[in-house]
Image: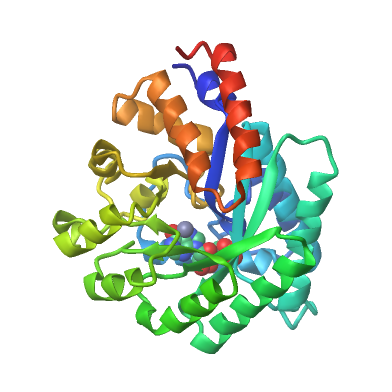
């Protein structure tokens, strides 16, 4: 399989944080517009570099200093959608944390509206991509803020006729006790929002067990669910029994050093079990990757054939936060692609 095969393969991206997905080009344009950005700021990890989760989270803080206006937030969202569309991502769920910036007048409301406007503007162009939005809860912020995010998501879901589909739970996994947010997740579910939660990104078996009881619709990372990665049989059994899909982000885990190397990635374990796995980028800008590259790394590392890669991509459609009509449309696109890709 050539790099072109992975670019031409139709794909679904379900785990992409907007500010972590900023490409080098967009970043350069924003930095130039802004001026006065400290040249020593490190705004991405280049291919092959790895660091710690702590450094990854420091980087997000710097990126947020560059994307501190509604215009910048619009541009990032608009560009990220175009970049995913250019590598044949046909369905994209973006996620982002509503953020205010008093110095520029940006409020959480104007932030969310800017993101939504960019998505809507893209949908008026002839791009072959469907985009949905997930609002993110940062676990470093108070529970009351998380509750506001749920209400904001529910409000904008109504206002946009279903463009906002769910709630994410993210931020530094070493910060705070995630179990405190359980009432927030329950409220989100009550309001009809889907739950895509970062879980077991680092070993935290007690917290993970408590949060699992809300039965998230999808799990981000799930690196430390199995006993040999700091989880437990109980956690693994729960996830297996409920067939909770895992959003797996290979390069992200390597750069953040929560996984030692590609060959040790938990993808292998869950894939071999026949468990629902979706390959995602997490933060394609910060980790200097693309979804096509992540597919290519998975194929090479785990010796998967073109048919297996096509199937992996096709099965991802089952786990999107959209209705059967959208799934049906996507499945047709995938089936049509088979001949073009010479997949038997
Ligand atoms: P934003 O929400 O669009 O501003 O995207 C950046 C934010 O996403 C970060 O500040 C984190 O809260 C979150 N994020 C990105 N990658 C990860 C991850 O691997 N684990 C947990 N949170 C993450
Ligand atoms: Zn993530």
Quadrant of the rendered structure where residue 228 is?
bottom left
Q: Residue at x 46, y 79 (%)?
A: 140
Residue 328 can be seen, yes or no:
yes
Which residue occupies the foreground of this view, 18 or 315?
315
Q: Residue at x 81, y 59 (%)?
A: 117
Judge left or right: residue 233 versus residue 298. left
Q: Position of residue 40 (x, y in %)?
A: 56, 60
Mark count? 0
Q: Residue at x 36, y 51 (%)?
A: 253
User: Where 315 sits versus 205, above or below?
Assistant: above
Which residue occupies the foreground of this view, 318 or 9?
318
| The residue positioned farthest toward the front in the image shown | 324
- What colour scheme governs how the chains and residues are painted in the rendered image of this protein? rainbow
Judge left or right: residue 4 versus residue 277. right
User: Where 284 sits versus 148, above or below?
Assistant: above
Quadrant of the rendered structure where residue 130 is?
top right
User: Where 54 sits versus 274, above or below?
Assistant: below
User: Where 261 sits versus 116, above or below?
Assistant: above
Quadrant of the rendered structure where residue 67 is?
bottom right
Q: Position of residue 266 (x, y in %)?
A: 27, 46
Q: Position of residue 324 (x, y in %)?
A: 60, 45
Judge left or right: residue 234 versus residue 339. left
Residue 232 can be seen, yes or no:
no
Q: Residue at x 68, y 64 (%)?
A: 66
Instruction: Locate the C terminus and report the quarter of the image it occupies.
Output: top left
């Amino acid at each position: 399989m050539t790099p072109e095969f992975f670019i031409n393969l139709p794909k679904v991206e379900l785990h992409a944080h907007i500010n972590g997905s900023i490409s080098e080009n967009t970043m350069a344009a924003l930095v130039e517009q802004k001026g006065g950005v400290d040249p020593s700021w490190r705004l991405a990890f280049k291919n092959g570099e790895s660091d710690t989760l702590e450094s990854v989270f420091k980087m997000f803080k710097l990126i947020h200093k560059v994307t501190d206006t509604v215009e910048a937030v619009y541009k990032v969202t608009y560009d990220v959608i175009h970049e995913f569309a250019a590598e044949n991502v046909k369905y994209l769920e973006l996620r982002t944390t509503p953020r205010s910036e008093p110095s520029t007048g940006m409020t959480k409301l104007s932030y969310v509206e800017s993101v939504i406007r960019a998505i809507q503007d893209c949908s008026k162009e002839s791009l072959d991509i469907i985009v949905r939005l997930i609002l993110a809860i940062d676990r470093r912020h108070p529970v009351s803020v998380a509750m506001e995010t749920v209400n904001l998501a529910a409000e904008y879901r109504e206002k946009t006729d279903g463009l906002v589909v769910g709630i994410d739970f993210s931020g530094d996994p070493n910060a705070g006790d995630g179990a405190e947010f359980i009432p927030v997740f329950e409220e989100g579910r009550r309001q009809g929002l889907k739950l895509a939660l970062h879980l077991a990104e680092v070993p935290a078996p007690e917290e993970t067990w408590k949060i699992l009881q809300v039965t998230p619709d999808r799990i981000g990372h799930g690196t430390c669910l199995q006993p040999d990665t700091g989880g437990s049989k109980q956690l693994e059994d729960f996830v297996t029994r409920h067939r909770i899909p895992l959003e797996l982000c290979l390069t992200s885990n390597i750069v953040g050093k929560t996984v030692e190397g590609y060959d040790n990635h938990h993808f292998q374990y869950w894939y071999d079990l026949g468990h629902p796995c979706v390959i995602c980028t997490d933060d394609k800008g910060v980790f200097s990757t693309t979804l096509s590259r992540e597919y290519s790394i998975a194929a090479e590392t785990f010796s998967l054939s073109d048919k297996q890669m096509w199937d992996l991509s096709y099965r991802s459609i089952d786990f999107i936060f959209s209705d059967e009509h959208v799934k049906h449309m996507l499945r047709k696109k995938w089936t049509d692609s088979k001949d073009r890709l010479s997949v038997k």
